[in-house]
Image: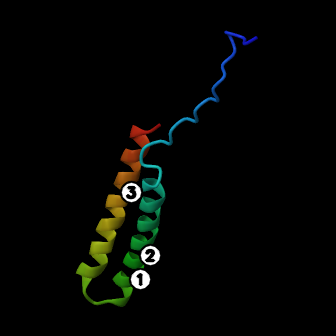
Amino acid sequence: MSDPYRIAETPVAAPEKPGGALRPLLWLVLFVSAAANAVLSTAVDNPWVGSAFGLVAVLCAVALIVHHRRNR
């Protein structure tokens, strides 16, 4: 005899949060661009090269903050 109050199906796992792979990728790009900025600002005479990596680092930091604020 079957129990009408018993759930026969196994519960479905909660879906992953959107952007699950985005955060580690942003952290990786942030660290690489910050390191490249530090190395290239001291080693290369052209300030534009180091500044480009600095801009990428700042943009990644802003994207990480926005991602955190939206998904908390």
| Of labels 1 and 3, the one closer to you | 3
Within-10-Å neighbours for mark 1: few <14, some 14–19, many 20+: few
Q: Residue at x 23, y 79 (%)?
A: 48
User: Helix, strand or loop at disc 2?
Assistant: helix
Identify the residue under disc 2. 35
Q: Amino acid at mark 1?
A: Val
Whole-number angstrom distance, CA of label 3 to CA of label 2: 14 Å
Vertical placement of residue 56 versus 7, above or below:
below
Query: Label for residue 66?
Result: none
**From the image, which quarter does the N terminus lie in?**
top right
x, y (%) of residue 5? 68, 10
- Residue under the image location 41 percent in, 40 percent down: 69
Point out the residue furthest to the front here. Answer: 1
Give the residue drawn at x 54%, y 35%: 14
- Where residue 54 appears, x then y in whole percent? 33, 70
Circle 1 — which element?
A: helix
Whether label 1 touches label 3, CB < 8 Å:
no
- Horizontally, is 45 left or right of 66 in the view? left
Left or right of 6, for residue 53: left
Cα–Cα gap, marks 2 and 1? 6 Å
The three-letter code of the residue at mark 2 reads Ala
Upstream in sequence: badge 1 or badge 3 = 1
Q: Would you name the residue on which mark 1 appears?
A: 39
43, 68: nearer the viewer: 68
| Quarter occupied by residue 56 | bottom left
Badge 3: how crowded within 10 Å, few (<14), some, or many (20+)? some
Q: Residues within 10 Å of mark 2 (few under 14, many from 20)?
A: some
Residue 20 x %, y %: 47, 50
Pick the residue in front: 71 or 57: 71
- Marker disc for residue 61: 3
Callout 3 amino acid: Ala
Are the residues at dot 2 and dot 1 in contact (C-beta closer than 8 Å)? yes
